[in-house]
Structures are given as C-alpha cells and as structure tokens.
C-alpha cells in the first residue's frame, strides 16, 4: 500500500489524550521536541502565513481538517504514513469536533508514534488537529520498530474500545500485508486484534461491498446477518439499500411493540401495588449496561408495596495463568450492531483469549499482552490509561488480577491510583 492521503476507511476512535499530562509508557524513547512553524488554514502557505486565532465558536461550527501534505510540512519527523495507520478509518465530523474541542481546552496531547524510518503509525488526527489549532509545538513523537507497527495499532484500537467492524478493517489490512503467511494465519491475526476468527471471517466476506460495510458500522445491520446475505446481494447497492430499509422498518415496528408492552406492564404494576405476596416473582434484572435478563429471586417480601428480592452475590471472574480460555468467556452476552462482543455483567469477565487477554469490569478494561517481546498489563477507562510491565505472562496476569480485585473491593476507586 502506498503512502497516499488518508482515505475514508481510516480512524482513531476516541480522544487520544491523557488527562494526567503524562505520556504513556509506550513504544520507545521519545524524540526531542522541535520548534515547528505555525501557519494558517485560511491564507496562503501553512509555513509562511501568520496563523489567525481560533475561537470556540469556530470549533462549534467546525474546524476544517488540514490535508495530508500539511503533516509533512509541519512535522519534519513524519516522512510518510504507514499502512497500519491507513488501516484505521477517518474520524467522523462529530469525533473530529470532540478532538478539536479537547485540544483547544488545553488538554495534554499523547505522543504520536512513528517508525524508525519516519512513517506515521498512530496519532495522525492528533497531529492534524494540533495544526488546525496552532498547537503543533506541543506534539511529541515516540519510535517503534517497523515490525511492531500493526501491534501498536491493535493495542490502540483495543484500548479505545473500538467497534468490531473497525478491528476487522485494521486486521484485514494486516492480513493483506502478510499475504496469509504460515506464521500469521487468519486465526492468529484475529487474536492479535482481539476478535474471534468467526467474526473476522464474516467481515472478510463483506469487505468488498463498501455500502454493506458502512451499514454495519452505522448499526443498520449486524455483521452476522450481513455475512449471511452478502452472496445474495451480488454487489448491487440498490439491493443493499432495500435490505437496510426493510430492516429499519422491522426495527421500528419492534420498538413500537416493546414500548406498548412496557406501558401495559407499568399499568399492571401500578394496579398491583400494596398487595403482599410471598410467592417468588420472576422479573427482569438490569445490568450496568442497561440490558435486561430474566431472573427469579430466591425470596421476595413486599413491604408497603415495595418488592425487596434477596439475591446471592456472584463471585468475580478473573484471569489466571491456568484457566484463561474460551470456557471462561461470558455465558450471557448481548451485542450491539457494529460493536465488539463484550460481556454484559456486573462482574469482571473474560472477553476473549489468544493474543491479548482482555478483562472487562463495568467501563474499565484490563489488557494483558506481549508487546515488543515484553509482557505488560494495561488499564483503560480511568482518568488516563496506565501500562504496567511484567517479567512474564503469569506476572502480567497476576498484575491484572490485582487491578481487578481493587475494582471489585473498591468499586468507586480509580485504577490510575494503583
């Protein structure tokens, strides 16, 4: 793949900023900060013109994105863009505005990552936003070996809780580069990017149909259904649109029925208030993610019309060096369209095995993986991401268990305080 201007199939998925102001213990030694020229996006050459002041109102309206050429003009460290960077899709307008707002407010900018030969691996949107807002002097760089470029992208996507479709997109680019070598099979590539081989195979079936891929990413159709019908669509955009419209109408009808059922249930509950009963009541239990599952309490008592079920607390599931595997995967999951298969539960859950090991507790993810030959455990979802080095896999998993124990024992604690 050539180092061309970034296409619409590329993105950084969240605000890649560290509120702590400290760079992550990332991919190598940071390069010395260099004084950069400040230009404008409104007049003349970005190197020669005097940059005009950007106001918050302009950000609300929308800051125009600098082009690829300006990356090379403003950052002499960047000599091109690595294919791994190009495998990540472009930020949406909303995501771009959020990034600009964050940088405009003075938030620290995480270092961008380049290879030893000067190819940009991670951080292109940060660099572009810094140019647009006149903060290019605040951008620093760390280096990474050429062979580790895709590992950097994989770890960044996992840490940013990327959607399944975005993980698949990056993994497919890596597969194309590897040309399905014996060392990197489809299964190993899927593991590297934190997904099942089955999900990756489904994406590979629809990858050539851009309209269908976009529909999956926007949540209009799930990946499983898209893979099942792609052969019948024959690459016909009209058939894709007809399918999406039919699914949207079906979804709207279902939501209407669900709303009617909820109203009926609420009226029924209102009428039955104050009636005492000792019969166990089968109800719905709502998880932290707002999803419901059927549950029957061990016992129920009604006091002044209030039902107070007595339930037994569940034990947390944690990673160990001997039991990490598919059998520990969450048994009750619900996936959102276009999102990765993440366990929905109040307990820590193993999300997948092979390659990195990811454990989720509420909104915090703990990742155990080998990076540049060294094992590490990293926490994502606190006030800032934290990475801890380990001597081996067992030590990394032990560190992850320690983090999870703290989260379970002290739910309100910040993992960054460890």
Image: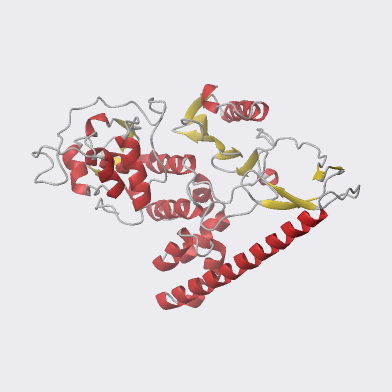
- For the N terminus, which image quadrant? bottom left
50 with respect to 408 (left or right):
left
7 with respect to 295 (left or right):
left
- Residue 188 visible to an observer of this rendering: yes
Most foreground residue, 72 or 261: 261
- Residue 123 visible to an observer of this rendering: no
Most foreground residue, 339 or 76: 339
- Residue at the image point whose x is 58% and y is 51% from the top: 341
- Residue at the image point whose x is 69% and y is 60% from the top: 262
Task: Count the numbered circles shown.
Answer: 0
Q: Is residue 271 above or below residue 401?
A: below
- Residue at the image point whose x is 9% and y is 40% from the top: 49
Q: Position of residue 405 (x, y in %)?
A: 65, 27
Q: Position of residue 87 (x, y in %)?
A: 37, 51
Q: Position of residue 342 (x, y in %)?
A: 59, 48
- Residue at the image point whose x is 51% and y is 77% from the top: 232
Most foreground residue, 268 or 309: 268
The furthest residue to the top:
418
- For the C terminus, which image quadrant? top right
Q: Quadrant of residue 52?
A: top left
Q: Is residue 403 above or below residue 230?
A: above
The way the protein has been coloured in the rendering is secondary structure
Q: Is residue 201 above or below residue 299?
A: below
């Amino acid at each position: 793949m050539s180092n061309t201007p970034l296409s619409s199939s590329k993105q950084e998925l969240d605000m890649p900023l560290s509120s702590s102001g400290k760079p992550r213990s990332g991919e190598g030694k940071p390069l010395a900060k260099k004084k950069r020229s400040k230009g404008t996006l409104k007049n003349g050459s970005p190197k020669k013109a005097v940059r005009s002041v950007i106001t918050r109102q302009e950000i609300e309206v929308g800051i125009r994105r600098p082009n690829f050429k300006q990356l090379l003009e403003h950052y002499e460290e960047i000599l091109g863009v690595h294919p791994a960077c190009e495998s990540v899709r472009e930020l949406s307008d909303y995501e771009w505005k959020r990034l600009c707002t964050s940088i405009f407010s003075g938030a620290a900018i995480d270092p961008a990552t380049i290879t030893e030969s000067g190819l940009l691996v991670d951080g292109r949107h940060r660099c572009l936003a810094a140019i647009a807002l006149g903060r290019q002097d605040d951008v620093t760089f760390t280096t990474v070996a050429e062979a580790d470029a895709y590992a950097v992208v994989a770890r960044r996507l996992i840490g940013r809780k990327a959607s399944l479709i975005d993980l698949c997109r990056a993994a497919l680019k890596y597969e194309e580069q590897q040309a399905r070598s014996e060392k990197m099979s489809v299964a190993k590539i899927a593991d590297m990017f934190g997904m099942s081989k089955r999900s990756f195979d489904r994406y590979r079936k629809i990858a050539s149909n851009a309209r269908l891929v976009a529909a999956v990413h926007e949540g209009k159709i799930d990946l499983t259904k898209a893979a099942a019908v792609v052969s019948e669509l024959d690459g016909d955009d009209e058939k894709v649109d007809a399918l999406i419209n039919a699914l949207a109408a079906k979804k709207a009808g279902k939501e209407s029925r669900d709303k009617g059922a909820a109203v009926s249930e609420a009226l029924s509950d209102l009428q039955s208030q104050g009636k005492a009963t000792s019969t166990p009541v089968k109800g719905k239990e709502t998880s932290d993610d707002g999803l419901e599952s059927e549950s029957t309490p061990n016992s129920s008592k009604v006091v002044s019309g209030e039902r107070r079920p007595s339930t037994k607390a569940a034990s947390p599931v944690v990673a160990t060096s001997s039991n990490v595997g598919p059998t520990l995967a969450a048994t009750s999951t619900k996936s959102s369209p276009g999102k990765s298969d993440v366990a929905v539960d109040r307990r820590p859950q193993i999300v997948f095995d092979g390659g990195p090991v990811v454990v989720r507790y509420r909104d915090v993810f703990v990742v155990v993986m080998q990076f540049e030959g060294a094992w590490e455990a990293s926490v994502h979802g606190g006030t800032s991401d934290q990475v801890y080095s380990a001597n081996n896999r067992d030590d990394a998993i032990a560190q992850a268990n320690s983090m999870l124990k703290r989260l379970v024992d002290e739910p309100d604690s910040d993992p960054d305080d460890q």
